[in-house]
Image (cartoon, coloured by chain):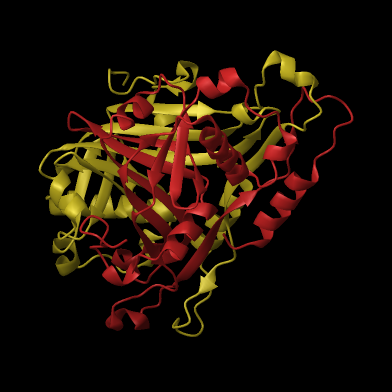
Chain colours: A yellow, B red
Amino acid sequence: MKTGRTQVKRVPKRGHYDSETVYSILDAGLICHVGFAIEEQPFVIPTAYGRLDNRLFIHGSPASRMLKSLQQGIDVCVTVTLLDGLVLARSAMHHSMNYRSVVLFGTAERVSDREEKLKALYAFTEHVVPGRWAETREPNEQELTATTVLALPIDEASAKIRTGPPVDDAADYDLPHWAGVIPLRMQLGEPIVDPKLTEGIGIPEHVKTYVDKRRKSVA
Amino acid sequence: MKTGRTQVKRVPKRGHYDSETVYSILDAGLICHVGFAIEEQPFVIPTAYGRLDNRLFIHGSPASRMLKSLQQGIDVCVTVTLLDGLVLARSAMHHSMNYRSVVLFGTAERVSDREEKLKALYAFTEHVVPGRWAETREPNEQELTATTVLALPIDEASAKIRTGPPVDDAADYDLPHWAGVIPLRMQLGEPIVDPKLTEGIGIPEHVKTYVDKRRKSVA
């Protein structure tokens, strides 16, 4: 998956091109940033996504400018970034962040087949909270029609990862400044029940499991 | 700051155009996603940023393709997204996320003046951890030269915010599915000391204060 477009140019040692690394970052993320250009004007739009095998899905209203543009087959860049830590060095210039990111290039295709579209919507829902699909009302025909789903092959993708302590200039290690990493993670809070929830419906197992699992994981 | 480019098209009631809202999101974020196009190929690159008044700064190596391209004056789109919650509805289709995002359009200008450059680097460092600048080694002349700093005016920006519980179709409120919000926040962990830290240097107050403050805040 290393091509002219995907090769990590700045700090090449941080680049990774294997599917396993790319997929693991995509699966740990919750939103992507979709980049496209219309008449040389770039747009970067945050949106949810799902993954099935080597395809990444985005979706939305058929009226969405982004989806209308992308299904014309224009080039698109999708980036997912996970922040893992603030890297505090002794010198201002060597401050950095620990992160995992994926940059994916390609063109999107509209998913028209009904079954394929359902699978993509399943992927979205399960991506947000695994086990959720089975405990929701599935999309009806009207909703399926009123949703545009686009697929991008995960063929031309690269991951970039920084981990570990700050790296200071040799001469700076004797300075009296504290240095280290402040870890960052996306933390889940206690679920807030919809005020309109029918009485007697408790928090389901899949939500409890998800919150517990995310809290324990490092992702 | 509402222009043809910045007007929020999808779900317009979520759009905000006042500086206060835009600045508050920019100040709460840690990274931005910078979008630009070279010969119709879009790129979306995650990077740190800083803000001073109505200018957003990004920086990096003079060899960076992104910085080299942007200082030619091409159009750029900078997006900052904060995830606040997973919105679980009764129907799969009404699943959503609570978030705060800013989309900023414009063209970048290179900051060449030495004092202005130092101020921008101050803004970066203080953006990551307030109080940090005073307890680091300031950039020397060589580092200043070896750093490109670009400024974008925060003139054409819009914020988009979703808060609150899921919104289901009227007929779905009687379904037996749980619905609600799982809050999300960027959580800071206990600082990890650089293994190469000189003995006897404790975790400084500005780091402790920052971790405590971030832990208590909702941002």
Residue at the right extreme of this rendering? B200
Q: Nearer the viewer, residue B64 or B164?
A: B64
Q: Is residue B41 above or below residue B78?
A: above
Mark count: 0
The quadrant of the image that shows the N terminus of chain A is top left
Q: Position of residue B47 (x, y in %)?
A: 46, 36
Seen at 89% across and 30% down, the residue is: B200
Seen at 27% across and 68% down, the residue is: B11
Residue at the bottom extreme of this rendering? A199
Instruction: For residue A24, say whether it is visible.
Output: no
Q: Is residue B114 above or below residue B123?
A: above
Asked whether, in this view, residue B181 is left or right of residue A119, the answer is right
Q: Nearer the viewer, residue A10 or B116?
A: B116
Q: Position of residue B35 (x, y in %)?
A: 31, 39
Q: Position of residue B81 (x, y in %)?
A: 43, 52
Q: Position of residue B198 (x, y in %)?
A: 83, 24
Seen at 53% across and 72% down, the residue is: A192
Q: Nearer the viewer, residue B158 or B93?
A: B158
Q: Quadrant of residue B218?
A: bottom right
Q: Is residue A121 above or below residue A98?
A: below
Asked whether, in this view, residue A74 is left or right of residue B216, the answer is left
Instruction: For residue B81, say whether it is visible.
Output: yes
The quadrant of the image that shows the C terminus of chain A is top right
